[in-house]
């Protein structure tokens, strides 16, 4: 039994991010689908966030529910994403999802890669 | 800058620093004005909007200051510097675009004729072309747009006064090239304004757009129907604008102050005071003026609106003839007009509004900001050209503002493309030789409405050679004029009867020749390249610092995961990187960063596995309990 | 008349289609097609203005270079050729004098000065057998020259001159229409001399109006 499992990690979305994700899943024709979040690594020069539609959940994946959206994270990524809040931001001329990660310590100049 | 992500299809999420595939292309509309310049884009709601600077202002003063050393300063800061550095601070550069020394008033600047007769201005200890100065303004707008849109621009629609001739258009396009902007299209300012107006309310019918800017006046008659914006006629004066009202008032001040030979500083101060008084008079009946005389004593005066109107009434009235001519060319009567739209900051002057209402027998429309409407329309057209709009519901059909012709015998002009011809257009005219055995023919291309060549603008001269010997009048030389959708002209000539094909294509030479543009681009690149190299070097060093720092903290935590050999390899790679950081070679530093990355990939992997094992172990323990 | 033409891009036979039926890519326009057919209006001196405008706009909406801003260089070139040809056709058909001259040319007459390729030689040749017309024209020109030399207070006379020239133009246009209608209906080689005479007169009147307008502007 794993009530403890859920306590060991958490990935959440803000309500507006969940609403946007739901809209995009609907548009894609997979309204019941999940969203995969993760990191890609590149040696020591940093990592970057990954956000994809998810069609299959693997054994080493963990699944979180946030405002009705299933968020799938592989265990390795969870190590550096634990506690992350995914938000959706709208400026006048651009919009998109933003990762608020308490473990994140530095970012490269352009904001595309980070370190923990 | 925060990176904002989209949800990608599985396996297609971009790697860091990869270009992102985007649904919408980042494009903007730019109003490169005489006194102010603006940049706009279509926002996420599908509405065009101007982009503000960090202080919230959307209007960038079109003023560039060149310090002796360092880069150009553009905008409000440059405007403030104009008082103390009048000659190194260039305002209203638009009136010099594509112009020769004899066409323009110096206005206190140090001018000379550059290559092709084009004006050059001495500022910041160097002779600069108006193209180059305009490029500095465009550069500032480009930076602003890239910040707001979150990445490099795909292209821009740039507006020009409808009455700009070919040389002025070519110069504008060259300035964009120099600023690294891809020009999607040059669009006439009143046409852009009509686009913003027409879309705003879904208006249909025939409209007049009266556009009095800082340095130019345009009138356009357009028909709006089913999303097609068709220009029926256009006219104007590319050397009449709000600046002239300032100058008129400034002359009065200088005369009253007893300054017969004003210094550049005197001129700047008087014009600045004049502009403030003019702006004050749009809302109040009187304005007060304060200036310092050369002896330090104060000059003070009140001016009321009536006096200002008398002083400038010939300027306002000068806009009447082009309006009447445009209506006639369009074949439109006043009764057929649906409305008159006011564009340009100078239409805020009450006397202008009264004049327009009287001329067109109706109250003009002013519901969109006359300063912003041109940039907003350009943004819409950019969105259309970039394919960002889902529906093909908009089309602009524009015309040539001025007649294009050739010099014939006796210095007369033979018109080949009449003014207000819809563009793109191609027209041909046949000419013949006037002497027996004449082997060459001079082709002189001019633009303008007058009958004599010397009263028109000379655009290009070239010679068609190799005409086979024939009696006078037997040769048939066909000269073809082609005007593209930007309003730019190409001329070619060919001898037809003998089947000997001679074809010459010329671009107007009054602007910048291709060679000169190339040289300037190279100079700008070399100049900018030096700055850029320094910046890249600095960035590489910072990046190296960060990588080393991250690695050191990882080693402090998990050194136990490495054996002695592995540790030695990593330390060697770190030493090499530190060595590269001491040097000036940015590329070497980046190479060494990558080498260190490769040398430590296994370590990063091992740390992650180790951490996961710890977590797994923890979970199993928990589960047991 | 179907042409044997293949798509420049994919090689499929396209005949007269503006877009390839196979790959949907824009084809070069047929330079031989006449202005009436190009804009979809019936051939004749009278043209339904609304139909002309709509035909022009609808076609520009399909072929204008703005529609091909992101397409290949060849596609952009063909779109430019289409838009140029549409503009020439529209400009010619909306103006009665240009339209008349164009019709005369279509019927095999000289139709000088009426189209893009109008020749220089013989341009201002005056028909010798028309002394009465010549006399009137010269008198009017002389008066205009006198008025231009001393324009103050001539407003009323200038307005009268305008009325007179406009009346003359209307008469010539009516004559041109009759002559062209006959020529268009002719079963054998049409007689075009009368239409050409009206066109010559109209060109003289147009030049007179241009000079008159210069004077009017001065007076305004």
Image (cartoon, coloured by chain):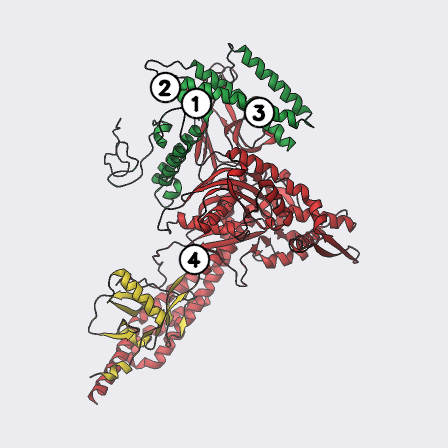
Badge 4 and badge 2 in a common chain: no
Badge 3 and badge 2 in a common chain: yes
Badge 1 and badge 3 in a common chain: yes
Viewer-nearest of discs 3 and 4: 3
Dot 1 falls on which chain?
C
Front residue (pair B280, B529)? B280
For label 2, the residue is C184
For label 1, the residue is C100
Question: On the rendered image, what quadrant is the N terminus of chain B found in?
Answer: bottom left
Residue B572 location (% of width, % of height): 36, 72
Chain C appears what colour? green
Mark 2 Cα-neighbour bin, 10 Å: few <14, some 14–19, many ≥20: many
Mark 1 Cα-neighbour bin, 10 Å: few <14, some 14–19, many ≥20: many
Dot 4 falls on which chain?
B
Q: Does residue B495 appear anywhere in the picture?
A: no
Q: Earlier in the sequence, mark 3 or mark 2?
A: 3
Residue C132 location (% of width, % of height): 55, 11
Whole-angstrom CA distance, mark 4 to mark 1, is 50 Å
For label 4, the residue is B43
């Amino acid at each position: 039994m794993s009530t403890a499992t859920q306590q060991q990690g958490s990935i959440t979305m803000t309500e507006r991010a969940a609403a946007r994700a739901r809209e995009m899943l609907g548009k894609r024709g997979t309204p019941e689908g999940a969203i995969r979040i993760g990191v890609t690594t590149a040696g020591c020069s940093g990592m970057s966030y990954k956000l994809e539609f998810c069609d299959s959940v693997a054994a080493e994946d963990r699944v979180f529910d946030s405002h009705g959206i299933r968020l799938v994270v592989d265990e390795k990524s969870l190590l550096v994403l634990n506690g992350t809040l995914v938000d959706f931001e709208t400026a006048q001329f651009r919009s998109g999802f933003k990762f608020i990660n308490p473990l994140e310590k530095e970012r490269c100049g352009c904001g595309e890669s980070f370190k923990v | 800058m925060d990176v904002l992500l989209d949800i990608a299809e599985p396996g297609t999420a971009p790697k860091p620093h990869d270009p992102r595939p985007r649904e919408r292309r980042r494009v903007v509309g730019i109003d490169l004005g005489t006194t102010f310049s603006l940049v706009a884009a279509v926002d996420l709601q599908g509405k065009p909007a101007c982009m503000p600077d960090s202080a919230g202002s959307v209007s960038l003063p079109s003023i560039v200051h060149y310090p002796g050393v360092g880069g150009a300063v553009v905008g409000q800061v440059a405007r403030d510097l104009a008082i103390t550095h009048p000659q190194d601070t260039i305002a209203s550069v638009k009136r010099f675009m594509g112009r020769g020394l004899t066409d323009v008033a110096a206005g206190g600047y140090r001018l000379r004729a550059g290559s092709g007769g084009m004006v050059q201005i001495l500022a910041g200890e160097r002779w600069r072309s108006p193209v180059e100065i305009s490029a500095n303004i465009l550069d500032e707008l480009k930076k602003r747009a890239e910040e707001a849109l979150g990445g490099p621009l795909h292209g821009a629609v740039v507006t020009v006064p409808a009455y700009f001739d070919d040389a002025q258009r070519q110069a504008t396009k060259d300035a964009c090239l120099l600023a690294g902007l891809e020009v999607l299209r040059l669009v006439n300012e009143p046409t852009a304004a009509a686009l913003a107006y027409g879309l705003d309310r879904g208006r249909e019918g025939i409209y007049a757009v009266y556009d009095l800017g800082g340095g130019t006046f345009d009138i356009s008659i357009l028909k709006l129907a089913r999303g097609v914006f068709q220009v029926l006629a256009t006219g104007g004066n590319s050397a009449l604008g709000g600046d002239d009202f300032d100058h008129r008032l400034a002359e009065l001040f200088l005369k009253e102050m007893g300054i017969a030979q004003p210094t550049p500083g005197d001129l700047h101060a008087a014009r600045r005071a004049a502009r403030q008084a003019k702006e004050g008079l749009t809302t109040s009946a009187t304005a007060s003026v304060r200036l310092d005389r050369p002896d330090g004593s104060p000059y003070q005066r009140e001016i009321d609106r009536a006096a200002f109107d008398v002083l400038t009434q010939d300027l306002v009235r000068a806009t009447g003839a082009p309006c009447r001519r445009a209506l006639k060319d369009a074949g439109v009567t006043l009764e057929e007009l649906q409305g008159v739209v006011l564009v340009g900051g100078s239409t805020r002057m009450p006397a202008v509004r009264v004049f327009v209402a009287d001329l067109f027998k109706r109250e003009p429309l002013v519901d969109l900001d006359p300063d912003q409407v041109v940039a907003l329309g350009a943004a819409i057209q950019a969105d259309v050209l970039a394919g960002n709009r889902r529906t093909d519901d908009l089309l602009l059909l524009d015309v040539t503002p001025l007649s294009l012709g050739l010099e014939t015998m006796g210095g007369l002009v033979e018109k080949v493309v009449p003014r207000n011809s819809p563009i793109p257009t191609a027209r041909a005219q046949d000419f013949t030789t006037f002497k027996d055995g004449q082997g060459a023919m001079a082709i002189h291309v001019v633009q303008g409405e007058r009958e004599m060549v010397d009263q028109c603008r000379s655009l290009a001269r070239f010679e068609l050679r190799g005409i086979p010997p024939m009696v006078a009048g037997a040769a048939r030389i066909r000269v073809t004029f082609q005007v593209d959708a930007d309003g730019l002209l190409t001329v070619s000539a060919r001898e037809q009867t003998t089947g000997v094909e001679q074809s010459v294509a010329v671009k107007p030479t009054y602007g910048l020749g291709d060679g000169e543009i190339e040289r300037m681009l190279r100079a700008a690149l070399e100049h900018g390249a030096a700055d850029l190299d320094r910046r890249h070097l600095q960035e590489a060093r910072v990046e190296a610092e960060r990588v080393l720092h991250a690695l050191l903290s990882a080693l402090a935590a998990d050194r136990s995961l490495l054996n002695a050999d592995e540790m030695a390899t990593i330390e060697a790679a770190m030493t090499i990187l530190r060595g590269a950081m001491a040097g000036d070679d940015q590329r070497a530093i980046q190479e060494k960063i990558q080498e260190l990355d490769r040398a430590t990939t296994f370590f990063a992997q091992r740390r992650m596995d180790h951490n996961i094992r710890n977590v797994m172990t923890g979970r199993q323990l928990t589960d047991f309990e | 008349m179907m042409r044997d033409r293949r798509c420049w891009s994919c090689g499929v036979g396209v005949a007269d289609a503006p877009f390839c039926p196979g790959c949907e890519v824009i084809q070069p326009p047929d330079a031989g097609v006449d202005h009436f057919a190009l804009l979809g209006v019936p051939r004749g001196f009278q043209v339904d203005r609304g139909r002309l405008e709509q035909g022009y706009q609808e076609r520009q909406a399909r072929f204008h270079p703005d529609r091909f801003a992101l397409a290949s260089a060849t596609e952009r070139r063909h779109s430019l050729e289409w838009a140029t040809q549409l503009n020439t056709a529209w400009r010619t058909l909306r103006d009665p004098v240009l339209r008349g001259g164009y019709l005369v040319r279509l019927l095999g007459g000289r139709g000088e000065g009426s189209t893009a390729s109008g020749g220089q030689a013989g341009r201002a040749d005056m028909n010798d057998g028309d002394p009465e017309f010549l006399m009137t024209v010269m008198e009017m020109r002389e008066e205009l020259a006198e008025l231009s030399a001393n324009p103050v207070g001539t407003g009323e006379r200038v307005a009268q001159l305008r009325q007179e020239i406009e009346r003359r133009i209307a008469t010539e246009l009516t004559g041109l229409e009759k002559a062209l209608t006959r020529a268009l209906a002719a079963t054998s080689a049409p007689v075009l001399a009368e239409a050409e005479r009206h066109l010559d007169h109209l060109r003289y009147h147009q030049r007179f109006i241009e000079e008159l307008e210069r004077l009017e502007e001065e007076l305004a």
